[in-house]
Image (cartoon, helix red, strand yellow):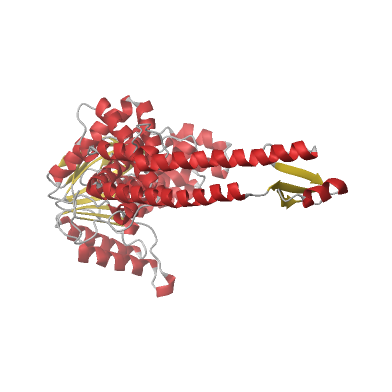
Amino acid sequence: MSTTTVKLLANTRSRTEVGLEAVMSDMSPHTSYGEKKKKEFRPYRPGSEAELRAAYDDMDILRKFAEENKSLVDDVLVNMCGIKEMSGTLSRSETTVLSIVELFEVKAFLLRTKRISTVLEESMAKVPERYRLVETTRLLDILDPSGERIDTFYIYDAFSPVLGELRKEKRQLEIDMRKAQKAVRQMLEQQHGFRMTPKCELMVPKANKGLMELAESLKELQRSDEDYMTVVFTVAPNEEMYEIEKRSEDLNGRIEEEEYRICEKLTKDVAYYKDKLEHNCSVIGNLDWDLAKVLYAIERNCTRPEIAEEHIIEIEEGRNLVVESVLRSKGGEYCPVSVKLEDGVCAVTGANMGGKTVSIKMITQIALLTQYAMYVPAKRACVGLSDFVQVLIGDSQNIQRGLSSFGSEMEELREILDNARDRSIIVIDEIASGTNPAEGLALTKSFIKYFSGKPYITIITTHFDHAAVGSHVHNLQVKGLSGVDFDKLERELTYANRKERIGIIGKYMDYHLVPIEDGSAAPREALNIAKILGVYDEIIDEAKGYLI
């Protein structure tokens, strides 16, 4: 992965505007290590084309595995869900004796990574290096001496013959204690005719005065509990029991010392494997993050982009993932758009309903997704890496600073001018729209001329006809309602309400981008839309006269 951090490829606003942040938020790793890889990931820059292609090669192998082995993918994800963050545990292993819980987490990590590794090794012809876990079976054997391979941890007798003998002796003392208590219980029952529980308890109703006086007079019994109706008596310890209890306490101390010694040894074993475990944590992060990208791509029919050496963007049937998701939630379909761009200016014209903004966001989204090593929403895409991407879309008004929308726009354009460099992507929606038309047209032409001489791919939407002229400049038009049967459309609109009319027009709108030949006029889409929405013919005709 590229580590160039001289300047951001794209600022937060640009990433948000084009939907990259929304797309990434929908990709959810299952482990803390995957989340860390996601947060730390940096885009590939020009010069890292071979490295990026290699990253896609690895993900292609992972994608093939995911597409052909859904149940195994589910198995991998289930095991990932059980992997806990243990970087702190690994660090402490070098200075502090680990607790039972921490040793359990290490064992659980070893078990789950072993299962994941086995699935990958058995399902892939060759596991890519970035997903290859190093062997840690020896440490698992140390932490699981009985070989049960279950998700529990206990200081087993198998860890130490001494511990086994101490616990055996303790179990015998527990038996001896129960025998001593049972002997007292049987003696009391024979002598006094009452019945005690198997736990050597005598339940005495407070209303039974005689039994209460008898129980309180017997030195072999002692009060242990009571409620508003009953007093519970248990067998009181005698000399034999005191001796057993003393020996048991001594054994407990020796057992604790032996368990601590075992934990100390196991901690040293974990510390010895620390580097390998940390490596595997990183590998799990790679696998988790890449699998999140792959599963997202499969679900949304995204494809691997081609990586070009030259600075170009070619998209065949590209889609905007964010807009597509919204449309599908409402039962709509996205109209894919194709485009070819290289250094120079591309001016996009069309009515406000024509989807210009959606398309320029889609183009930038695909370019950025590529540089973040993600699959892209297109039938085909070929992208040359950029070194700077900035998007200026929408009203940038900042009232607190006392700036108009035009003033804010000019400030952001100055930022673009100051930071753009070779192999930049500059995207500007409705340039100079916040000032009077005459000055707006002049500024638009001037900006277009400036950008056309730079090694940038510049995309500008505008309502100004013939603003984009000259070498390294080409014009695209949203096809819109061209070719639509307006009589049919008007009939469909006749009985529709206001809200429904907008939706009907959108259904007929063709969002494909088509080139405008030099010297030809852009279609008058705004007049067509105004007419079919009911603006009087005399007004439309008058407007057409002004355009001649």
Considering depth in this image, is 217 or 541 the residue closer to the camera? 217
Query: In the rendered image of this protein, does residue 417 appear above or below residue 211?
Result: below
Position in image of residue 199 (x %, y %): 66, 40
Left or right: where 220 falls relative to 512:
right
Asked if residue 60 shows in the view, the reply is: yes
Image position, residue 236 (x, y; %): 67, 49
Residue 180 position, x and y percent, is: 61, 41
Residue shown at the point (32%, 56%) measured from the top left: 92
Return the residue nearer the eye: 153 or 10. 153
Q: Is residue 229 visible?
A: no
Which residue does the image show at 54% across and 41% down from the upper left?
174
**Displayed quadrant of residue 119:** top left
User: Residue shown at 20%/41% (left/top)?
Assistant: 55
Viewed as shown, does residue 517 lie left or right of 156? Answer: left
Please report the residue visible at 60 percent of the width from the left and 40 percent of the height from the top: 178
Q: Nearer the viewer, residue 281 or 531?
A: 281
Task: Left or right? Give the position of 225 relative to 384.
Answer: right
Q: Nearer the viewer, residue 87 or 190?
A: 190
